[in-house]
Image (cartoon, rainbow, N blue to C red):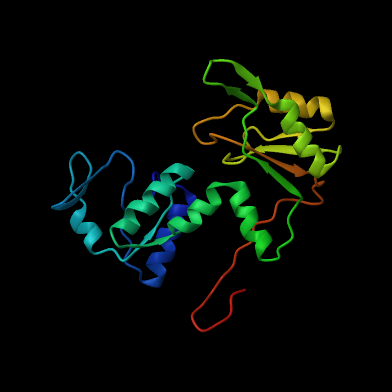
Amino acid sequence: MYESADTDEMGIRLTAEEMGVDLVYIPFRKISVSISNDGYQFKTKGRHLEKTLEGVNTVLNRMQSKNARLYASSIMEGLGKYVLNPLTLEYLCFSKFRSLVELWKRGIRIPSTVFIPLDAHDITTSGRQLNNTEAIADLIQDSLGEGDIVLKPDAGTHGRDVRLSRDRKTLINNLTISNPSIINPIGFVAQEFIEKWFYDLRIIVAKERGKPPY
């Protein structure tokens, strides 16, 4: 299941052919999903896909946006499919802090991190605007000190709105210009700044039946 064929999708198709896996394409854009007491429909404007889905055991969820992946996993699991990645994993990965909590409780080393579920600006029921930047900055610096701090949207993606604060003044400014959005409705994640020593690493865990993961 993917939105558009890219290099990775072509690689998946070629690998499936080499392994003899019967791979089918299921769209998740410009489709309608209907549910009722009589069953469900999954269709594009000119094609019904219920029969295609009946023959599918496992769905590889390749949606690009986090929201789309969450919906696709939820729907496919609701239809009884085994989904990669499953909804529980997509839910964890949707949030930086939820992901870090999972790593932390398993004893995996992480940067010192603070999550503050509070927006820089609130509107009271009377219509008065509250400025929370000083209070948020205090909470962050109480935990991380006054050194370099990286401020991130909890549900951001592709590095958008990630900002480095070198001092209190910059931290206040970065908090001020950080606004809630549809994908990041509330909260800030602040982390100690760690100098990049080399380059980004991609870590892949492989697991074969009967063998330990590596």
At 53% from the left edge and 30% from the top edge, which residue is drawn? 181
Answer whether residue 1 is visible to the viewer in this image: no
Residue 54 visible in rendering: yes
Residue extending furthest left? 38
Query: Relative to residue 210, is residue 160 depicted above or below?
Result: above
- The residue under the point 59% across, 24% down is 122
Residue at screen point 38% across, 47% down:
71
Depth check: 44 or 42 in front?
42
Residue 149 to residue 99: above or below: above
Percent across and percent down for residue 157 are 58, 40
Q: Quadrant of residue 167?
A: top right
Image check: 79 left or right of 153? left
Query: In x, y percent, where is residue 153?
Result: 62, 37
Taking the image as shown, residue 27 lies to the left or right of residue 104, namely left
Q: Position of residue 89 (x, y in %)?
A: 50, 57
* Left or right, 35 with reference to 176: left
Extreme front residue here?
126
Q: Relative to 179, does residue 77 appear above or below in the rendering?
A: below
Number of numbered discs:
0
- Residue at (53% x, 34% y) in the render: 185
Query: 134 left or right of 180?
Result: right
Residue extending farthest bottom? 210
Q: Quadrant of the C terminus?
A: bottom right
